[in-house]
Structures are given as C-alpha cells and as structure tokens.
Amino acid sequence: MSSTWGNSIKYTIFGESHGEAIGIVVDGLTAGFKIDLEEVEFEMKRRAPGTSKLVTKRKEKDKFEIVSGIFDGRTNGAPLCALIGNINQTSADYEKTKNIIRAGHADYPAFIKHNECNDYRGGGHFSGRITAPIVFAGAVAKQILRTKEIAIGSHILQIGSEKDVAFDSVNVKLDDLDSLKHKKIPTIELESAKAMEQLIIKIKQQNDSVGGIIETAVINLPVGLGEPFFDSLESQIAHLVFSIPGVKGIEFGLGFGLAEKKGSEIMDEFYIDNDCIKTYHNNNGGVLGGLSTGMPLLFKVVVKPTSSIKQKQRTVDVKVKSNTEVEIVGRHDPCIILRTVPVVEAMTAMAILDLV
Amino acid sequence: MSSTWGNSIKYTIFGESHGEAIGIVVDGLTAGFKIDLEEVEFEMKRRAPGTSKLVTKRKEKDKFEIVSGIFDGRTNGAPLCALIGNINQTSADYEKTKNIIRAGHADYPAFIKHNECNDYRGGGHFSGRITAPIVFAGAVAKQILRTKEIAIGSHILQIGSEKDVAFDSVNVKLDDLDSLKHKKIPTIELESAKAMEQLIIKIKQQNDSVGGIIETAVINLPVGLGEPFFDSLESQIAHLVFSIPGVKGIEFGLGFGLAEKKGSEIMDEFYIDNDCIKTYHNNNGGVLGGLSTGMPLLFKVVVKPTSSIKQKQRTVDVKVKSNTEVEIVGRHDPCIILRTVPVVEAMTAMAILDLV
Amino acid sequence: MSSTWGNSIKYTIFGESHGEAIGIVVDGLTAGFKIDLEEVEFEMKRRAPGTSKLVTKRKEKDKFEIVSGIFDGRTNGAPLCALIGNINQTSADYEKTKNIIRAGHADYPAFIKHNECNDYRGGGHFSGRITAPIVFAGAVAKQILRTKEIAIGSHILQIGSEKDVAFDSVNVKLDDLDSLKHKKIPTIELESAKAMEQLIIKIKQQNDSVGGIIETAVINLPVGLGEPFFDSLESQIAHLVFSIPGVKGIEFGLGFGLAEKKGSEIMDEFYIDNDCIKTYHNNNGGVLGGLSTGMPLLFKVVVKPTSSIKQKQRTVDVKVKSNTEVEIVGRHDPCIILRTVPVVEAMTAMAILDLV
Amino acid sequence: MSSTWGNSIKYTIFGESHGEAIGIVVDGLTAGFKIDLEEVEFEMKRRAPGTSKLVTKRKEKDKFEIVSGIFDGRTNGAPLCALIGNINQTSADYEKTKNIIRAGHADYPAFIKHNECNDYRGGGHFSGRITAPIVFAGAVAKQILRTKEIAIGSHILQIGSEKDVAFDSVNVKLDDLDSLKHKKIPTIELESAKAMEQLIIKIKQQNDSVGGIIETAVINLPVGLGEPFFDSLESQIAHLVFSIPGVKGIEFGLGFGLAEKKGSEIMDEFYIDNDCIKTYHNNNGGVLGGLSTGMPLLFKVVVKPTSSIKQKQRTVDVKVKSNTEVEIVGRHDPCIILRTVPVVEAMTAMAILDLV
C-alpha cells in the first residue's frame, strides 16, 4: 500500500490540497532526454481550473518547478522531482465544518483511517488537486513515448444523455488524436460537443453536476507489452486509472457489451496486411491474454458526477456521532470529466512507459 | 512486471497448461492458522471442469498438494506452496498447429514477446488452467478473512440477454452470500438461473459460446482500507481481476450507469444507525476516495464469450506469415463465466487480505 | 533498482548537490505522531559541515522545510516530504574540469551510466550531501522507535591507528547511547577521543584524510524481526548502510573475527534471567538466522578516507580519453567518519522502522 | 519483508528442511535461453553434503526437477520453478527436543516470531538446506551472465589461522576463476589448501567446527551497474549474501583495512590502457559511488563456525522457561564454509543478473 507505483519507472506522489506544496518524484528515466517544458505546461493547462465557463472558476497556481533530475535541459539520470506550490488559504473556512463529512468524498474513511488526524482542508491528500503532479509526470511520459511513435488521445464519449461516436476500433489516426487535445470539449463529432456544452451550462444553472464517459486510444504500441499474471496491460492501466478521483469503471474493447455477445460474433480474426499481422475487428480493444496485440489499445472510463454540489445534504458529525445537515459552498465543476481527460491520459502514459 | 503480486502478502504463480505442474507460493501468512483443506477443495471444485453438462467435459486433475508452509495442520510462517500436477498429454496435437494463432487468445502476442519460444500447448502460461492455483490461494485468503467476519460472495447478473436482479446495495446478507456458492448457476432469483441454463444449452448446441456479468459483494470490511494514490481499493481489486483470462471490464457501484446521472441523484448521504455511520444509498459501491466505507463493497465484472468455439476461423501462420484457416477442436466451455465466479472471488480475497 | 526503498514504510530520495533542492518522501507513517522538530534539527546538525575545526569549513544550508504530511504538528497519514534547499553556486568552477574524473568518486561510472548527461557538479546525485535528507528521515524514524523503547547509538571505534574500546556486547546502556551523541568525537573512553582529535588535526595539516570504523548498537528490539530469506535483519541494515558514500564493509557481532574462531569458543548459550531469555555472550551481535534475538544488535561499519584530498593525482579526461592530472581544490573533511555517524544511525532507524 | 527478491528478475524461495519439498521460482528470464542442466547439477554438487570426509556425511537428495518455465530445453518466458524433494525422515528425533533452543541457530527467535508454530525439525525454513534452490537459481544466472562474458569465482582466503593469498585486485584471470571450482578446497596456493585440510580434520576430531573467509571476484562487469541510493551494487550483493546462514560480515576492496589508511595511500588513480579506462589500484574493489567501475569486483565474506557441534551446551526450554542442557547429535560440518562457497557465488550471480 503506497504512494509509490511502478517497476522500471517509479512514481512517488505527495502533498495535500492546502499544504505547502504538492509534487511527484519520477525515478528511472533514462538520462539525456530533453523535456519540452512548454508541452508540459500545455498538458497541465488542460487539467487546470478556471479556463472556461464550463469548469470551476477557482484559480489555482498550477505552476510547476523542477527541483531535481534535470541538468542543462536534459534528464540527468537522477530522480526527477517537480513541485507545485499551493496558495495559502485561510484554514478558518474548514475549521468549523471539519467533522461534517461530505457525501461522495473520502472524508469519513480518511477520518477513521488516519486516527482523526487527516488534513480535512479541501480533501487534503485525497483532493483532486493531487492530480496536477500526475499530469506533470504523464506529460513527460507522453513525450518519451512519442519518441517511440506511441501516441495517446481521448475524446468524451458521453456526458449525461449526450453521446459522441466511438473511435473506429481498427483505425485510429494520429492526427485525430492530436487534434482532440486542442478542443474545449474533445469529441469526434462537432455536434456532440455543442450538445454537451449546452447540457453542462444547464446543469450548472441547476447547481448540479453530471457524469460521463471518456474513451482513450493508444496507437503504435509494440506487440507483447504486459504479463498474463499479475501485471496484464489491462491491470496496469486499470490500477492507475482507479486512483483518479471520481473514476468508477473501466472497460476494454467492447467491455460490458460482451455480456450479450456470442463467441462467433466477436472473434477478432487475424490476417496479413502488408506483412503485418492485424485483426479484422478489435473487440478486445488491443489486448489479448493481458498483452498488447499491436492493434489500437482502446478503453472507456466512467467518471461520476462531482460530489460537491450546492445543495443541502443530510450528513453526520463524525466526532459527536449525530445526524446533521450541510450545504457545500464554493465554486465547483458542474462536469469534472472535462478536466479528468488529461489525467486519464497521464495515468495511461505512466503505465505504458513503465512497461516499454 | 511480474508473476509476483502483493505487499504484506505476496503471491507468486507459476506453471503452464501442459508442463509438469502449476502452482502458487503465498508468502506472509501469519503462523498458526489452521487451514480447512476440505473447504479449499470445495472452492477448487467450483472452478474445476467436468462437473456438469454446462461446462467443458475435459477432466483435469485439480488435486493440490501443499509442499511447504504447513506444519501439524497449521501455517508455520514460512511460504505456503501448493502444487497441482498436470496430466501428461501428447504434445503431438499441438505440434502441427503451433504457428496458427487463435482468435481471442494470447498466441500471437506471446509468440512475439517470448521470442517464438513460448509454450504454445493449450495456451501455456496464458491458459485459464493457471487460475486453479489462484483459487487455492483465494480459498486460504477467504478463510483468514472469515475469521475477521469478512465474507465474499457472487452471483451471475447476466448471461447473454438473460438477467438476474442485482444485490440490494445497502443490505447484503451473509446467508445469501453463503448459499450462492452451492448453486449450479448462482443467481439471486431462481427463474434467472433456469433461463440462463436453457440459454447455455442452446449455445452449446450451436457450437458457440456466450459472455456474461458477475456481481461480487464483500461485507463487513473495516472502514478505511486502501489508499488514494496509487493503491486504491478499486485499483487493487481491478489489478487482480484484470489478470483473469476473459475479463474485459469492471465497475464499482453504479459504474457506467453514473455517466447518465446528476450529482443530486446519486448522493450517498450519511446517517447514524445504532451508533454506526452508514449511507442511505450505496451508489459508490462501498468505496470513497479509494477507501472502504464500511458499506458493502460491490462491483461487476464482465467476462467475454469463450474464444475457443468449434467454428472455422480465418487466421494466419505467424512463422511463414501467410493467411490460413483453422477450426479449433476439443471440448470447450459454452459459458466460461460459470467457472470464473470462484476465480473473481479468489482474486478479491487475495486483494483484500493484502490490505487488512 | 531505485531511489525508493522499504516495504511498510517507503523512502524516496531525490536531489543533486548543486540542483535546486534535495529531499525525501517518507510514506506509510501512522497518522497522529507528533514530530519533535528540534530533535530533528539536532540530528541534522550532527551531520552538517562547518561545526568544528575537525570537519570541512564549507557552509551548507541544511535547513529543512516540511512541505507535506504534517497537519497541526502531527503526521496526517499522507506522505511526509521534506525539502532542503541548495545554495546557488556558480557552475563555472566545475565546467572546466567536468570531464576530469576524480579518484575514489563516482564520476567515471556515472558518466558512462547516464550517457554523459550526469550532473557532475559536486558529485550531483552521488554527493555525500544527499545524506542530509536521510538524516531527516532517520531522525523521524528514531523518534517513532523511541516510543517503542528502541534506542540507537554509536561510537567511533577506530580512526587510523587510534582505537576506542568496544561496546559491552551483552549490556549496552541507554544512558551511554544517549550521551554519545553530544560528544564532539563520540568515543566510550575519553582518551580515545583526544588521541583521535590529535590525529585528525595532523592529517589535516598534511592535506590528507583518514578512515575509520563506527560501532552501532540498537537496544530493546523485539525478538523475531527479520526474515531468513531474503530480508534478514542483517540484509536490511547492510542494504541501507552500503548506500552511504564511503562505506566499504559491515560486520555483525564478532564479524571477521569469527574466521579464526572455533565453534566451541563462540557459542552464545541461552539462560533464563528474570523470566527473560538471554545469552551469556553475544558473538552473533543480536541476530540469529536473520532474526533479532532481543540481545543488543551490534555492528561495525568501515568508512574509507575521504577521496577528495588536496594532492595532485593522475587521472584521465573521459571525453577525449587521454591521461592527465588534477588537483582537487576546496575545503574537504580530513575525517568524514565524524559526519557519517548520524547517517549510519539514520539508515539503521529507517531499516528497523520498516520492520517493526 | 518477504521470500521474494529482485526487480527485473524475481526470486521466490520456499520450503522447510523436513517438509515435502523445497524450491524456487525465478521470474523474468528472457525466453529462448538454453539451460545447461549438467552445469546446474555440477554447481549443486559443489554445495551438496556427503561429497568428502571434510563435510557432513549426511546424504540429501539434492536432485532438482524443473516443473515450469522450460519448453523444448529452453526458457519459455513463464516463471521457472525448480523443486527439490526432501527425504522423509522421522519427526520423532525432533519431537522430544522441540522446545530446547540451540545456540547459534534461529530456534528461539523463530519460535517467538511464528507464534510457537514454526517447523522446528532441522531448522525448518531457516535450514541451510534451503540454500540448495539458491544454488539452482544461481547456476542458471551464472550461465546467462556468462553469455555476456561476466564470470564469477571464489577461493577460500582463510580457515581458522590458515590463510591463502588474495586475488590480484587489478588482474583476475578467467582461467583462474574457472579452475577454482574444481578444487576440493578452492585456494590460489596449493599449500594453503593442504594446511586447511589438515586443520579441518583436526577440528573434526575435536568434535568442533571452525570459521573462515571467502573472497569472491566478478570480472567483465559493464561499467555503471548499481545506483547511489538505495540500490548500490554493494547493497544488492550484501543484501543477498546476508541471507546465507552463517554469514556475519562482508567487505569490498580493502574493506576494514581502510580504517588505518590515509587517503593518499589508497587513491585508485585512473589511466588509459589501450583505449580503456582503468585504475592503477583497486582498493575500492570495483565499486565507486555504488556503481561498478569495470575493474574486478572483489569482496570478502566471513562465515562463522558451524553452530551444531557435538558438545554439551547450556540452554533453555522455551515452553516452560527453564534452564537446561542439550548435546546436539547428528553428523555436522566441521567447516561449513567449503559448502558455502557456491552459495555466495549463486547469490552474487542473482544480484548481478537482476542489474544487468
């Protein structure tokens, strides 16, 4: 059980929402890689709050500082550590409600787990803010993977009842993946994004939130990444994706749709295409027996509606053990999935870099 | 990347489908625990083939032998190793088709990953047979968890278009969990099992296979198991479950259903019940912020239809790189999910024991 | 291979001698522990340079800042991260000799290992300065161990030809351990310290350096810490101690002296003392079969003479591959062992805390 | 804390002296390596008892069986598992003295650690017999290393007061390493072996035992293996070597001799030799800053005299907590170091293979 993950590359995360700083240590990077810092900043901005009316207006300083592991612009073989400072906020806001646990948040189990000493301010170490260093590490991982032609991209497949079309499972194009990350709402079809935007605005006006589904693709993976037991490619990605706040499900290829299928309907038959071995279909999402097949890796991740909504909720005071009520204040995301997209991609990049 | 998993308890798996033996080493068990070997045998029989007309007729010797870690019937603090011998089969059957990769199986990526030296007979180390030692380890883990009141049970929620009702998410009863494991097709409603049975017989007659969904519940978990980064309770379970052959998706609580929900609809509000802190609903499936909440842990796993069906398929010869055809012979499961249930439970028990 | 070590407690170190900052992340500490920061500062001062005429005059800011893991003065269950800023120094000094590898330092293998991109300034990540965060983590570990009565202390057994008496192996007193850390040269006999001081001053005048031996004791360990394979108590301590720059050997109990002994001479026979099980002698240094015996844990560590001495040395330019000469300038320690003592204790505390 | 060790290659050991079988799982070997089984048998025979009058007469079946990981004579990419069966012995011998702890053995701490449930017969999992699977794994590791020109060899530097000359630290020859393993007592000088043999015979007649020192060399290591923190080359080797029963100390290069040296005396100055970078001396034993330098890796290991000697000893009954006496019967090694040599080499090979 730990804040460190990985084998050949190790990621160690630290920090609390209202502490001095949050950060990450990435260990095991090959020396001599030139990190494109502007590209890292671009990725971090995709996650940052306050960028549009669709996301929370909160301003957070997501400016990172690299304190070790870089020399003359290149990785130097020592652990890479990036820090992101927190803006000092008054703790007073949190003091009075510190024992009032919020629905959908980690407040209650964290209180018990950490002997009533957890940092309750803004969720502490459980805050979604801790995903900022994840995006930093993922941005570096993505750049390294890109030198091996491996590219990662995502679109929003669904928000509430509004849906986008899915990726073409046997033919995901690099250009499409790259263009998605520049869109305010990344969808394949323009109409889907428009409908989703209207839905989010409506939800926001209702002081409510809404969930959604992200579909992620990874292309140009070498064949054979992963292990049957216990570190399948699906295991590694699922492991990391399930540590993103709000994620409640993941499926590869047809996923839950496979329950209704017959074996004869979903066979991914092989054929030779220009001396390459491919499958006519890709119902398995690019993974067989836990290993990458060389076909596009495809998976979907569901993100629950933000738990923090401006509506009164019944709850309890964990200290005195009594029923009470609370209304969460502050500026929250009506649809956090917009900001979760780069986090899912970061975790995916981290998982794959560890395997490559 | 490895065949060893776990922190406080470490599981190391080995063996190939047609090798000398398969087995598992479980390290870190407290000394002095009396293992109920009959109970272990019962669990292994749930997974074994040849037990009814609904599963493959193949006979495999799933008899385990404990070669270390037990003294006078109790764990002795040293690593527990169990072996399961394989029946020697003629390799001749496999020799002639060894370069013909089968759709849906690991044949192709395993061939590439292991430099053309993988054991291709019956899937080798990628075979579903390797789940037998998993069930052994899970059976031991279950017994230890039971001494802490923690119980695990599952039912089949869906096979093809036939569905069962879901668990009552706030009230899963121990007796119900225990009775499920004695059923030929474990469903909550008797009618569901009947319909599923008829469907499987029909599918079998068609020389086809069908997928399904398992719903698993864990009750009486202590509050606070898991970590936000990177070893959330969901991460740990998903990690292990995704190394089960055939599993393509997992969701906790409402899972993918959350995409269509508003925050106001899925709030798991807290209340005091007899001095205990509970939630009125359990849309989060017993996990918040990666930690157990004390409510029933609930998740669903989708299993794809068995890839081995008695129908001609287009494929390639990986050695000469040419298109060809193959028809898989042998006695296969029309609905492998029946035998996957105890494996999912075993992996769950292993994940939880490592955390407790 | 990694900058992270530990099982139940994980330590992740980062930083280079002339980078922005160095630091450590300690993960897995129980929430609610009140860290005595003055005590931590005291330990760090024991390692710091510039404290007397016997050590280097270099001034380094060893002031630590805790950026996460503490809330209201107590550990909060999240990873504890401490940073120690570096004073910005001009790199110009190092630029001109960057390809001239120094005898006794990691320059050459680091140059090869890190594709010529290692940070060569002051040893980079290989610098002895990186032991400052180790002492931080060790100081915290020591405090936690102290709540369990476990105490660690050391004296200098030898510097050059000057020797101190050894600990009484069956009777190490807490007061003695505690008083040692307040001494300028920690020896059991006052005369030894005086002789060692004179030797160091003489060596310093010769622009030379000298090696030595540290003897460390740990008392009140519970019986049974460690494992036979592969994590014996000796393995864990040796693992960490051998990552301290300059350490070239470790021995437990009689150590290398055992080569000349007969079995009949070194039997640690057991007896009952006030209902406790003890041994008459402690030639095994408190470890049997890799496990703690409850007797004082005793080991000796040899530290080589500082490699940086103000004398001309033959060497090579690794870039152009030619023979050359260099004379190392700067203010170096004539006897680094004085500053290594708290580092050995810190590593010991870290190893033991991970096991307890 | 665990019976599994390693990063890129993982070794998992299991078994008790009088259980069904002992064995090891080696995970992470590249597929396609042809193991020379005769060579493995040769290595195992070096460790086996009963081979001469200088070692115990006990006959143990050290015949290994590979149960997984090999296909058509080559590694297949799946975990390699080897089993070594135990001869069933009557437990009756041990039953009556099961609570009488033996000096120098793990009996007492094992009894406490494992809740009085440890397998006390012949030391159980703490038995020196468990090193047989280590030698198996080491033999495989050695063969793989040999394909990369890396060779390991050892001689006995000292037994009691009898000494051999040391390796020439800058010039260790492959032929010399290879010839050592065929000698009954592996020494560089023939006279040393003769004197040691006479000493052992004398010690045996006295029903006593004697300790000694092994010096091991590894040649042709690539430059840069290891890490400064925490996995230095010295750390990795020391970690494994300290899990060999009887080992109480390890030193690299001049080791403890460095305490008396001045910096100016032990400088390993660099020079160019035929376009290679070498050092005139090798006082650091081939490791600088935790990394291999390309010079011969040299270290010494001290092994204590066998604790089991046929002489009456004072001890206690741990169950009733009373003083008593015991005389250990059976045929024991007067000088176990003869059989420890291949174990040290095996551990070294395992450590290095994990790093290469």
Image (cartoon, coloured by chain):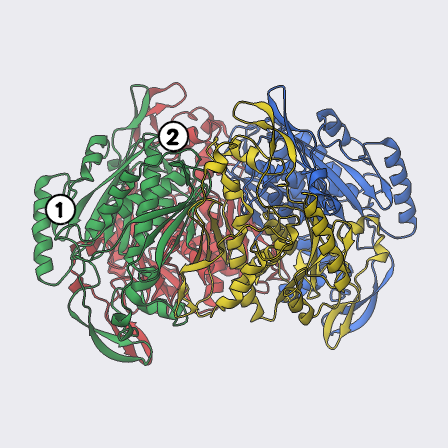
Chain colours: A green, B red, C yellow, D blue
> Which quadrant of the rendered structure holds the N terminus of chain A?
bottom left
Q: How many numbered dots are placed on residues in this image?
A: 2
Element at badge 2? helix
Q: CA distance from mark 1 to mark 2?
A: 34 Å
Q: Is residue D310 above or below residue A286?
A: below
Q: Write the residue at 22% across / 56% down.
A: A304
Residue D222 in the figure: left or right of residue A113: right
Q: Write the residue at 26% across / 37% down.
A: A266
In this figure, which residue is indicated by the disc labeled 2?
B108
- Closer to the camera, A325 or B197? A325
* Parent chain of label 2: B
Residue B152 in the figure: left or right of residue D125: left
Q: Position of residue B41 (x, y in %)?
A: 50, 56
In this figure, which residue is indicated by the disc labeled 1?
A163
Task: Note whether residue B327 is visible.
Answer: yes
- Closer to the camera, B190 or B106? B106
Q: Position of residue A180 (x, y in %)?
A: 18, 38
Q: Position of residue C83 (x, y in %)?
A: 44, 55
Q: Is residue D196 above or below residue A48?
A: above
**Residue type (three-letter) at the residue carrying disc 2:** Tyr
> Which quadrant of the rendered structure holds the C terminus of chain A?
top left
**Residue type (three-letter) at the residue carrying disc 1:** Lys
Q: Write the residue at 35% across / 55% down.
A: A22
Q: Is residue D321 above or below residue D8?
A: below
Q: Write the residue at 46% across / 33% down.
A: C117
